[in-house]
Image: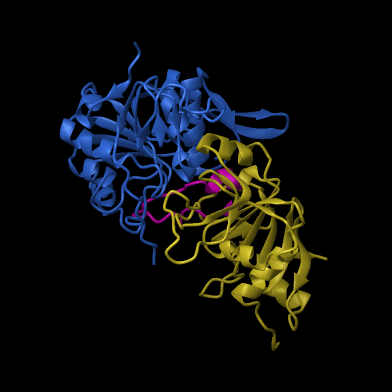
Chain colours: A yellow, B blue
Amino acid sequence: MTMSYQKRSKDQLAARVARDIPEGAVVNLGIGQPTLVANHIPKEREVLLHSENGLLGMGPAPAAGQEDYDLINAGKQPVTLLPGGSFFHHTDSFAMMRGGHLDICVLGAFQVSATGDLANWHTGEKDAIPAVGGAMDLAVGAKQTWVMMDLLTKQGESKIVPACTYPLTGMACVKRVYTDLCTLDCTPQGLRLVDLVEGLTHADLEKMIGLPIAH
Amino acid sequence: MINKIATSVAEALAGVPDGATVMIGGFGTAGIPNELIDGLIEQGAKDLTVVNNNAGNGDTGLAALLATGRVRKIICSFPRQADSHVFDGLYRSGRLELELVPQGNLSERIRAAGAGIGAFFTPTGFGTELARNADGNPKETREINGRQYVLEYPIYGDVALIKAECGDRWGNLTYRKTARNFGPSMAMACKQTIASVHEIVELGGLDPEAIVTPAIFVSKIVKIERQATQAGGFKKAA
């Protein structure tokens, strides 16, 4: 079997995620790769970005020299506030998540199980210092939790797995996984195909992941 | 006359006892009451439990407090940073106890203490390693309306050290941008709340519709000259 397919670049993947974010949605973009999604939301589509340290209506990074270190995002990077944006304290901010008020959150992951368990906070190594931040709150709080990641590890192993071997962030909380090779839904019955990159077949993908994928 | 204005950091912190649980506000660069932390180091209270989102960066502020060896335990959500070497060393050598709490549970447990809530069920952390007590036994869980929840208890504090923007002699506070973060909840959860402010106004000088932390939650305020909050201390992990 020879596979000839083109992976989605990081920007193409971010654009693919952005395509599914509807007008009017309230969205939290996780630290790292998910942050890129903001660059691909069309200007005419109004989306409210939430940051868990206490702002809604987050704007892009400020121009050089305009940074205000009292105005930062969850990744501790300086940001701006759009007209209409608001500040609030941490407990209210996490109530927005846990209370189901956020429409979508987009997170990175180490592993996702076919039924939507998420592992993204800790590799479980014995001497690693654990740090969780808001990952667990985000994973279970938003109406929809999406994951964005490369499908395979550097060693070529699928990060979509029958059951997570890394410590869990949340159980059955991921609805959809966007990867450089495919988009899949996680359901109680397992994986369902949304799309895949050109040149890759459904059978190729099942072989890579090692799990059945419903159409 | 009610006057909660302290004339110096040392005066504001004079009553912090050994063994106290000290909540310290701040997230990232925003809202860290650095001058109050420095004051606490000077004041010398020991055997402390510190509650903060992080566990110090670089060698100043909270990291400097940890380096004194006067902190027994830290309760936080994200201790690991590119430059959290002071914490890392103390933790790895067993000289500092860590209670790791998901950020929203941390904030809600603090709020619950201030709001008189005995305990609460939260979905966050269910089915994870953090749904265990320090002794390794699972925390109490319950299914409510088809969803699984973990029982979490309040975190009560003796002293809150927070950074606000503007205050008055009654102790009403406003904040600046994302520097608000844990301040309002910590102010509710502690027997004593000490706030640094950059400006003190006459009573009536704060718009009552805009006061974020009402005077009832504040014990003392102390004026600190404004310095632009700096970027330092939060190097990006490689």
Hey, which quadrant is residue A146 in on the image?
Answer: bottom right
The residue positioned 62% from the left and 62% from the top of the image is A38
Number of numbered callouts drawn:
0
The residue positioned 52% from the left and 28% from the top of the image is B207
Q: Nearer the viewer, residue A179 or B94?
A: A179
**B223 relative to B133 in the view: left or right:** left
Hey, which quadrant is residue A156 in on the image?
Answer: bottom right
* B165, above or below A104, in the image: above
Q: Nearer the viewer, residue B75 or A36?
A: A36
* A135, above or below B142, in the image: below
Query: Where does residue B193 sit, x and y in percent of width and height?
Result: 36, 25
Magenta stretch mostly in which secondary structure?
loop
The residue positioned 30% from the left and 23% from the top of the image is B5
Q: Nearer the viewer, residue A51 or A58?
A: A58
Specify the quadrant that holds the C terminus of chain A: bottom right
Q: Is residue A179 visible?
A: no
**B103 relative to A99 in the view: left or right:** left
Residue B159 in magenta? no
**A62 relative to B99 in the view: left or right:** right
Query: Where does residue B56 sit, x and y in percent of width and height?
Result: 31, 47
**B226 relative to A111 in the view: left or right:** left
Q: Is residue B39 visible?
A: yes
* A204, above or below A49, in the image: below
Q: Nearer the viewer, residue A32 or A178?
A: A32
Of all residues, the one furthest to the top in this rendering is B1
* A25, above or below A209, in the image: above
Specify the quadrant that holds the N terminus of chain A: bottom right
Magenta range: A118-138
Query: Where does residue A143 sit, x and y in percent of width and height?
Result: 71, 45
Query: Where does residue A101 sit, x and y in percent of width and height?
Result: 68, 41
